[in-house]
Image (spheres, coloured by chain):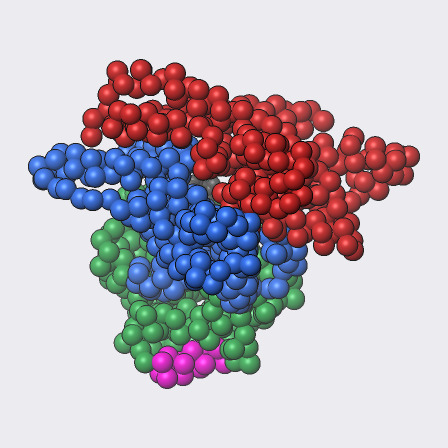
Amino acid sequence: MPEMGFVQQLGIGALMTIKVAVLSYLLALAIGTAFALVTLRRRLVVGFIWQVYASIFTGVPSLLVAFLFFYAGSGIVASLASLVGLTVTVDISPFAAAVAALGMVYGAYLADLIRSAIQNVPPGQFEAAKVLLVPQPATWLLVILPQVLRLALPGMTNMWIVVMKDTALISLIGLKEIMAYAKLASGVTKEPFIYYVLASVFFLGMTWLTYFVSRRIESWSERGYKPVVKQEPAHAL
Amino acid sequence: MHYDPVLAWESMPTLLAGTATTFAVLLPVLVLGLLLALPVALMRLERGGKAVFAASYIAFFRGVPSLVLLYLVYSGLPQLSVVRDTFLWTVFSNAYFCAWVGLTLTHSGYMAEIIRGGLAAVPPGVVEAATALGLSPRQALFRLRLPMAARYVLKAYQNELLIMVKSTSAVSAITLVDLTAAANTVFDYTYDPFTPLVTAAAIYWCIVNIMRIGFTMADRKLNRHLARG
Amino acid sequence: MNAVTQIAVPSPVRRETPAAVAISIRKLNKFYGGFQALRDIDLEVGQGEIVILCGPSGSGKSSLIRCINHLEQHNSGTIRVNGTELTHKASDVAQVRRQLGMVFQGFNLFPHMTVLANCTFALRLALRLPAAEANDIAREYLARVNVQDQAAKYPSELSGGQQQRVAIARALCLKPSIMLFDEPTSALDPESVGSVLRIMEDLAATGITMVCVTHEMGFARRVADRCVFMEKGEIVEEGTSDRFFSAPSTARLKAFLQQVL
Ligand SMILES: Nc1ncnc2c1ncn2[C@@H]1O[C@H](COP(=O)(O)OP(=O)(O)O)[C@@H](O)[C@H]1O
Ligand SMILES: [Mg+2]
């Protein structure tokens, strides 16, 4: 049987996992949205920067990126700052390195997803808003965004699960999340099986919860659309 | 930050050994995962208990991070007496073996879902036509449905493969010195994190992009075949 | 705003002698890359006039109508709408668009908003009207196009004809003095076409200015003050609807009419 003290620690670790995953995902969303918007139209310099960024961050394991940020992050920041004549010394915590790494890696994936969702909103929607004199910010927020969300939601849901699972991997840089505590409890009690099973249950539960919530959001975002014949929920538990 | 080309060159043997380990983990996983995924995908398309089992299999191995599976197999299983007290102990105390098992399970979960999707996309009329022509269900599966499904899922398979390349970095957690771990080793005895990690990143980048190019070429070849047929 | 009274009260003005110019286009040229879609277009539309644009597919009708409300930027020439010259400056574009209502072939309703929300959207965001007032205006125009009962539904729950009528109501809500139509019935099933054309005929009778691209020649004959025939980016022939249909002067228009009538 697992000891309650260790289970409690596992719970604390689980909260950390969720915290890192949520922050990473928000950062990824910000990066992804920004890249999606600036690469909507073909522009040489921006397009090139995007290509390099995407190529690097989708071509390298997120764990390696996290190691790089954790061990070399302060050096990278310092030399970037010295380029503009500043002296900066920062200490990169495992937490910061994990969030930065996951955010930047999955930002690259989300950018593609969001861009193609925007491109799949019919151009007539922009035109209708224009001729109705709707201000640009309102057009993006109230006309385009809801339709982009509807198109991008399934992909965004899957990406969230991937980010959450990758958080477990990133624990190897020294993040005190659920895997670290499971490992600790395993070492002390010599009963690793049960703690890793508990960790599995946590991740399965989070996946289930994600699909539960996302189905709610999806049916909300589908309002106004004819009920299409749903494919069977391929990724659901 | 300073990139030290001399150090990069000197650490190349270590990094390449790590790369070899990465491939030694990866290649069996790709083969075994595919072999395991096929029956699961077929079961998933049936009705009743088999489908429920297959669905649970897919949901479990896709839902649990591969690191958790690796720990479960490497340190969790030997705790059970069936493993500890039998010949299995020798097998499960081998890190390579555990890496293969853990990653194969993850890979097979994803592959089963991909294959299921591909098989489901084959128009039912094609299978009916084959049956009418006298092909046995087995022949229809291997000669018709799977080859057609393979074309539908090429893109998804490419993504999964590239993800698997990067997922192998998890095996450093169970003592294997793969490319990521090798870079960390170099860092440990040189105190320069930047050079070995960036060099390792470059090697990963090359592997991933060579695979991408390979897939683009395979895709073109298959499409040409489609156009001709 | 005189636009309000123009819609609300049928205009007694005789259309043959328009009181003032609503749209004036001079030497308009439009290129897509190297391809010239409009060539030296001259066109004047009087206030309260109903002008029908017709011509084969690809002749530049949409391009012309989209240049008028700056959905496409013209390359040279001038466009004046109620006296305002349409430059590429944002303030001019807004000023011109305020005079214009636009109805698209594909409706372009906002799919995630109810019919009522589609109509109140611009009132609330562009004109910043309070919700109650916007709702009243929207309901009034929805009633005028006979879809008042559908106000709470989503566009996808309506027939094509109903959707297009909602789109017309949505445009009218902003009380434009000029309405632009780009093949409003081309995407509709035959039964729905009549309902939309009837609404447009009613609208024409109110004295609003209309520029309408359509292949519905019967409709054109009934309501048009003037018909304009375009081909290959040029205006080939224009005239009163009587002359246009019964005595076309160019061979190209004759051939075209033979095909569509
Ligand atoms: N956005 C565009 N880019 C390039 N060519 C275009 C574009 N829009 C229209 N064209 C071309 O301009 C010509 C006129 O098009 P259009 O104004 O749509 O004609 P119509 O509405 O009379 O059918 C056509 O040859 C069409 O191919
Ligand atoms: Mg057109």
**Chain that the image shows in blue:** A
C176 or C41, nearer to the observer: C176
A60 or A43, nearer to the observer: A60
Asked whether residue A211 is in view, the answer is: no
Q: Is residue C40 above or below residue C239?
A: above
Q: Give percent across and percent down for residue C128.
A: 29, 74
Q: Give percent across and percent down for residue B94.
A: 56, 31
Q: Is residue B163 above or below residue A33?
A: above
**Chain that the image shows in green:** C
Magenta residues, start to end: C131-143
At 60% from the left edge and 64% from the top edge, which residue is drawn? A226
At 35% from the left edge and 27% from the top edge, which residue is drawn? B185
The N terminus of chain C: image quadrant: bottom left
Q: Is residue A79 above or below residue A166?
A: above
Please state the total of marks drawn on the protein image.
0
Q: Is residue C135 above or below residue C121?
A: below
B78 or B207, nearer to the observer: B78
Image colour assigned to chain B: red
Asked whether residue A215 is in view, the answer is: yes
The C terminus of chain C: image quadrant: bottom right
Q: Give percent across and percent down for residue A134.
A: 33, 64
Q: As drawn, which residue projects farthest toward the front?
A: B85
Q: Is residue C132 magenta?
A: yes
Q: Give percent across and percent down for residue C18.
A: 34, 67
At 27% from the left edge and 36% from the top edge, which residue is drawn? A71
